[in-house]
């Protein structure tokens, strides 16, 4: 990698110096951190938006304006917030193998969560936590869903105290629970583990568009991983 490429893609300049195993898990986490948010935006957030459009309650308006359709930036913020909650309440066996070398599934989930949160911080300075465990989200799917709806109210600027109760009585509740339950199987299925070369190429492209909060996280994680590798001898 030339000196100019280091400036154009600083995140990748850290990843490329890792061992093959560490490089693979970080590339996997980077790819999933973007893919999962995108999938949730296209499915859960799109369905949520359509539901609000159908309900169209006067108290869910800003003045005379409906809150739907969502601006693109709002849609992505809702998706990132949901992703944090879903990752925290996804049923993961802490010691289950991930198929990614020495890393257990829970370790990989935590890394993906850190990456999603770091991007979330870049667009929402009010996000003060940096890990899934510090996010305030419960490991209970029902509790995490309610917590997410409260945070969505803040993002959408809603104040109706009945909003959470009403939405929890719609198919959204089942959609949330099913999505959380499906994450581990989808993420750690052998079919999802692309070849190392393909994963690296995908991650390299993702790295080109990362905000500085994520680049800093990757630098910190990479430095720790290299120190641990030296300690293992």
Image (cartoon, grey):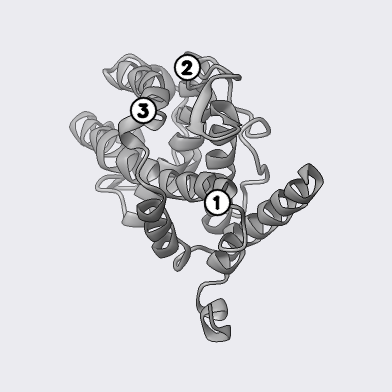
Q: Secondary structure at mark 1?
A: helix
Q: Earlier in the sequence, mark 1 or mark 3?
A: 1
Location of residue 59 in the rendering, given as x and y in whole percent from the top left corner = 35, 33
Residue 8's place in the image compared with 185, above or below, is below
Horizontal side, residue 13 vs residue 28: left or right = right
Q: Secondary structure at mark 2?
A: helix
Q: Is residue 150 visible?
A: no
Location of residue 32 in the rendering, given as x and y in whole percent from the top left corner = 42, 43
Please report the residue visible at 45 percent of the width from the left and 29 percent of the height from the top.
149
Q: Which residue is mark 3?
A: 189
Q: Which residue is mark 1?
A: 20
Q: Around disc 3, counting alpha carbons within 10 Å, would you say few (fewer than 14), some (14 to 19), or many (20 or more)?
A: few
Q: How far is mark 1 from mark 2, CA to CA?
A: 35 Å
Q: Earlier in the sequence, mark 1 or mark 2?
A: 1
Mark 1 vs mark 2, foreground winner is 1
Horizontal side, residue 38 vs residue 106: left or right = left
Q: Which residue is mark 2?
A: 141
State the residue in front, 132 or 101: 101
């Amino acid at each position: 990698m030339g000196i100019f490429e280091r400036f154009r893609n600083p995140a990748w300049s850290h990843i490329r110096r890792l061992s093959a195993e560490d490089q693979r898990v970080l590339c996997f986490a980077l790819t999933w951190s973007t893919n999962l948010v995108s999938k949730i935006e296209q499915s859960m957030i799109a369905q949520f938006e359509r539901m609000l459009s159908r309900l169209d309650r006067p108290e869910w308006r800003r003045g005379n304006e409906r809150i739907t359709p969502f601006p693109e930036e709002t849609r992505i913020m809702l998706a990132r917030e949901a992703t944090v909650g879903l990752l925290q309440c996804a049923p993961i066996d802490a010691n289950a193998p991930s198929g990614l070398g020495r890393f257990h599934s829970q370790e990989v989930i935590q890394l993906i969560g850190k990456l999603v949160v770091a991007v979330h911080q870049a667009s929402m300075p009010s996000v003060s936590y940096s890990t899934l465990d510090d996010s305030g989200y419960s490991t209970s799917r029902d509790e995490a869903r309610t917590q997410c709806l409260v945070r969505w109210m803040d993002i959408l600027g809603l104040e109706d105290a009945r909003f959470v109760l009403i939405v929890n009585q719609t198919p959204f509740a089942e959609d949330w629970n099913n999505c959380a339950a499906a994450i581990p199987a989808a993420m750690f299925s052998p079919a999802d583990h692309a070849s190392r070369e393909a994963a690296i190429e995908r991650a390299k492209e993702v790295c080109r568009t990362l905000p500085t909060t994520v680049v800093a996280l990757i630098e910190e994680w990479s430095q720790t991983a290299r120190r641990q590798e030296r300690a293992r001898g």
